[in-house]
Image: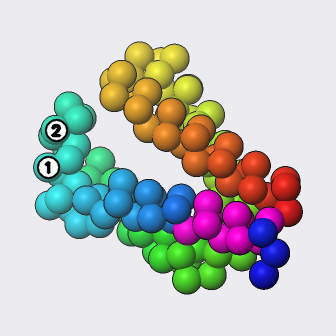
Amino acid sequence: MTTERTAVTRWGRAGALYDLVASIAFVTPWTSGVVLDVLGVEAAIPTRLFATLFGTVVMMWSIARWLRPEPVLIGLDTAGRAMFSLWFVWALANGETRVLWGFLVLELFWGAAQLRALVRR
């Protein structure tokens, strides 16, 4: 395995681990309700449902990237991070909670790290 491929694997798995840790609390309606309350978001049933769906998909995607950190999957994840970042900026521009700044910074960091590894391979 070349050094470049190792960097893609390393950054891809690190990003997957971050996503798993950041989203694991959203995997059930009960835990997502607690997190949403802490974040100051009204945790009505529809909100908890979508947060739980998001948490489940991100958790599964994280596990897939951890088990198979292939460049194509890391590339797709990097594109997804760019889109997530765009939606965070949109929400912030529309007055959403400032807590999103932390998530935006982390998405930009992981996206840039993965992109750099992919471009250098």
Q: Do the residues labelled 1 and 2 touch (CB within 8 Å)?
A: yes
User: Front-most of 14 and 97?
Assistant: 14
Looking at numbered disc 1 in the image, what kind of residue is underneath it?
Val
Question: Where, quadrant-wise, is the N terminus in this rendering?
Answer: bottom right
Residue matched to label 1: 34
Q: Is residue 41 visible?
A: yes
Quarter of image, res 41: top left
**Whether residue 118 is situated above or below residue 71 in the rendered picture:** above
Q: How crowded is mark 2: few (under 14 residues within 10 Å), some or many (20 or more)?
A: few
Looking at numbered disc 2 in the image, what kind of residue is underneath it?
Val
Question: Where, quadrant-wise, is the C terminus in this rendering?
Answer: bottom right
**Residue 70 located left or right of residue 35:** right
Residue matched to label 2: 38
Magenta residues span 4-13
Please report the residue visible at 50 percent of the width from the left and 34 percent of the height from the top: 104
Please report the residue visible at 85 percent of the width from the left and 55 percent of the height from the top: 120
Give the CA separation, mark 1 to mark 2: 6 Å
**Residue 116 located left or right of residue 38:** right
